[in-house]
Image (cartoon, rainbow, N blue to C red):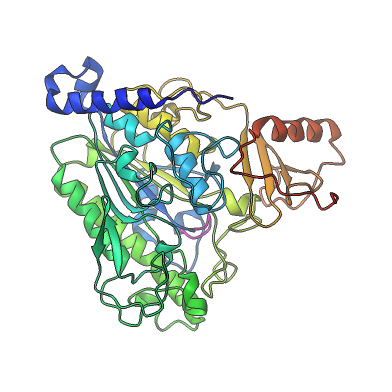
Amino acid sequence: MKRNASTSVKLARACLAAFLLLFPTARPAAAQTSPPNIVFILADDLGYGDLGCYGQARIRTPHLDRMAAEGLRFTQAYAGSTVCAPSRCVLMTGRHTGHARIRGNARLPLLPEDITVAEVLQARGYRTALIGKWGLGEPDTTGLPTRQGFDEFFGYLNQHHAHNYYPTYLWRNEARFAVRNVVPNEDAQGGGKASVRREYSHDLIAAEALRFVRSNRDHPFFLYLALTLPHANNEAGREGMEVPELGDYADRDWPEPQKGHAAMIGRLDRDVGRLFNLLKELGLDERTIVFFTSDNGPHREGGNDPDFNDSNGPLRGIKRDLYEGGIRVPFIVRWPGRVAPGAVSEQVTDFADFLPTAAALAAGDAPDGIDGVSILPSLTGSGAQAQRPHFFWEFYERQGARAVRQDRWKAVRQPWHAAVQLFDLKADPGETKDLAAENPGLTARLAAIMETAHEPDPNWKEPASPLRN
């Protein structure tokens, strides 16, 4: 399949965005109806079961629980992948990992012809910012956020640097921003374990997000707030759950990494609350739609044990699995006056749906050739909700994996060349009973989708079959 977007299309969109900013009265009529501000908050390695509103019993998340009570909580929402970079690529480009530009954690950049949600919104006159973790382009490449539709960027460019919560630098736009920590074993990508800890990166990122909102209170804005909590600092070993203080969990009779993990989630929750307080203070609450989710399932890194507090809830698997625990994630949407409070949706959705949804919110058009559909009808309860024919994921680490969901059925090959397993997610969301032998026709049909949904790419080599010489 050829990509429909070209460099000339991207240039045209950029020119349109600049024109709209210079001559606001020339905006199309649809844009004059005050489209909402859009905030997308992405946690890092937060499990389906890590929030109180999804059944967590021991880690307190009052602000996110209140967000769910005041908004819409999805029970069948999926990340774009089971690890960082490809999940974020799906989110930004609306293309699933069968033909997305970035399908694994190798540091390949987005290219000029890749159209991101930021560019779509920029063309509708939005001011755009990525604050947090990117993962889709290194310094001096076409994948830099400021070359992919973001007016402002502050944070980490790649996922390895983002392991370190006490780094010596972050990035502001395309330049390094010094941070007052000391990392004696700092590697070439900025990773390591600090010996002197003065500034916690999450706190800097949260403060920058609040600054961006204040600075753009009188203009439509898109804030992609890609937080790093509760990911581990892998380079710190069992001390990788880095957080300035343990707070409510300091006196718990828990292993230290579990105290740190809970405190990280608590800090994330606190700062979501600070954002909502600011929106109310500025009179932006009803003019702003806020999305909250996670890039994949919970991790077993930095000393963390995802089973200790049941981070995947009733689901099977964790990060790096294509079973539900690796890809099904919490997903909450709040928009006072437009999204009904306290509602729960069983609509199946994944990250590819965000780009067309954002385009619809801005009264714009999504690019051709994407996999997602707008879920605005599901959010507002108005209009007919388009349904996707299937959902697809592929994964390249270890021995690889593929999965496809269609209606209530999910087929999984893990590893890549293993026999297909079939699960009825309505009856068995924990994927405990393989029904492939009882449903050979359905199993074969879903296995065939795995082949057609995958578009070969020289950057992503199919894992070798153990049967091959």
In this view, the residue in front, 106 or 118, is 106
Q: Residue at 62% x, 41% y: name it.
A: 393
Q: Residue at 45% x, 70% y: name it.
A: 233
Whether residue 186 is situated above or below residue 422 in the rendered picture: below
In this view, the residue in front, 207 or 90, is 90
Q: How many marks?
A: 0
Whether residue 244 is situated above or below residue 2 in the rendered picture: below
In this view, the residue in front, 411 or 276, is 411
Q: Residue at 52% x, 57% y: name it.
A: 47
Magenta stretch: give its range.
46-51
On the image, the x and y values in percent for residue 444 come to: 81, 33
On the image, the x and y values in percent for residue 50 come to: 49, 60
Q: Quadrant of residue 421?
A: top right
Q: Residue at 24% x, 61% y: name it.
A: 177
Asked whether, in this view, residue 46 is left or right of residue 62, the answer is right
In this view, the residue in front, 226 or 443, is 226
